Amino acid sequence: MPAATELAARLGLPLGDLALLEQALVHSSYVHEQPAGGQSNQRLEFLGDAVISLIVSEMLWERFPDDDEGSLTTRRAAIVSARGLSRIAQRLELGSYLRLGLGAATTGERTRNSVLAATFEAVCGAVYLELGLEWTRDWLRVVAGPELDEQFSVAVPKPAKSALQELSYAESGRAPHYRLLSDEGPPHARHYVVEVLVGGRVLGRGEGRSRREAETEAARHALEELAGAGS
């Protein structure tokens, strides 16, 4: 059974035309190695990113009528980050349907957070184009349910970078230092890896599609490390 056909059936997507869903499962590395392999999912990723941001913003606005802009932004960031979207992609097993170039498959791109997040965005872009905004909204409420429920059940934490800065000043008298380890990929699909040091010690490492996203994940890991050391 073709990957798009199987995935549509698994996810309950009533798609009459599977061409866009098939495109959503094509990584750029596959097209680079197989020029006749059609278009990659990057255009759908671009559209899906905007669709997800709109729908998640709307759902959070409805669920948290007393939250200010900053709190809503923090909640949304936790869901639409590479880490957040990759969690959804992993539950849907999107990585197993993704068509990768041989080199990318060998280096583990299929399980990388940023690649999984981009694939989920592309799938959402395809669903939106085929089924419309209302259907996509209802579907996203279901597949992102655990993330939305998590945001509903806990108080909004202080942004990770702000919390780490306070702890860093308290511990070392200096701000944390974020060090860029790698910056790869084409301009429209960069992949950043960053580590953060507090008092000269490396306490966290993060990755993301922007340096800011990578720094935020590194800060979150550093906070977890500090919490574990203090327990």
Image: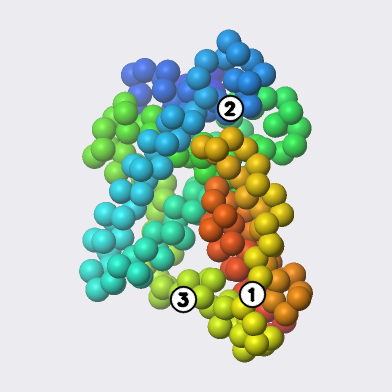
Note whether residue 199 is visible: yes
Mark 3 crowdedness (10 Å alpha carbons): few <14, some 14-19, many ≥20: few
- Quick check: 112 above or below 34? below
Q: Quadrant of residue 71?
A: bottom left
Spatial CA distance of label 2 from label 3 is: 36 Å
**Judging from the image, what secondary structure is the residue with disc 1 in?**
loop
Instruction: Describe the element under mark 2 as helix, strand or loop.
Output: helix
Marks 2 and 1, how far apart at CA: 35 Å
Give the spatial CA distance, label 1 vs label 3: 16 Å
For label 1, count other residues whose C-alpha is less than 10 Å away and answer few (under 14), some (14-19) or many (20+).
many
Relative height, residue 95 to residue 55 (above, below): above
- Counting from the top left corner in percent of width and height, residue 38 is at 52, 15
Q: Please give the name of the residue rendered at 64% of the width and 82% of the height, measured from the top-left corner.
A: 174
Mark 2 is on which residue type?
Answer: Ser
Say which residue label 2 marks.
Answer: 28
Residue 179, by quadrant, is: bottom right
Q: Is residue 93 visible?
A: no
Q: Is residue 69 above or below residue 158?
A: above
Residue at x-position 49% and y-position 49%: 85
Can you say which quadrant of the picture contains the N terminus? top right
Q: Amino acid at mark 1?
A: Pro
- Judging from the image, what secondary structure is the residue with disc 3 in? loop
Asked if labels 3 and 1 touch by Cβ distance under 8 angstroms, the answer is: no
Which tag, 2 or 1, sits closer to the chain's start? Answer: 2
Residue 79 image position (x, y, % from top left): 44, 56
Q: Tell whether 196 sits left or right of 13.
A: right
Label 2 crowd bin: few (<14), some (14–19), many (20+), radius 10 Å: many
Given contact means CB atoms under 8 Å apart, are the residues at marks 2 and 3 in contact? Answer: no
Mark linked to residue 158: 3
Numbered tag placed on residue 176 in the rendering: 1
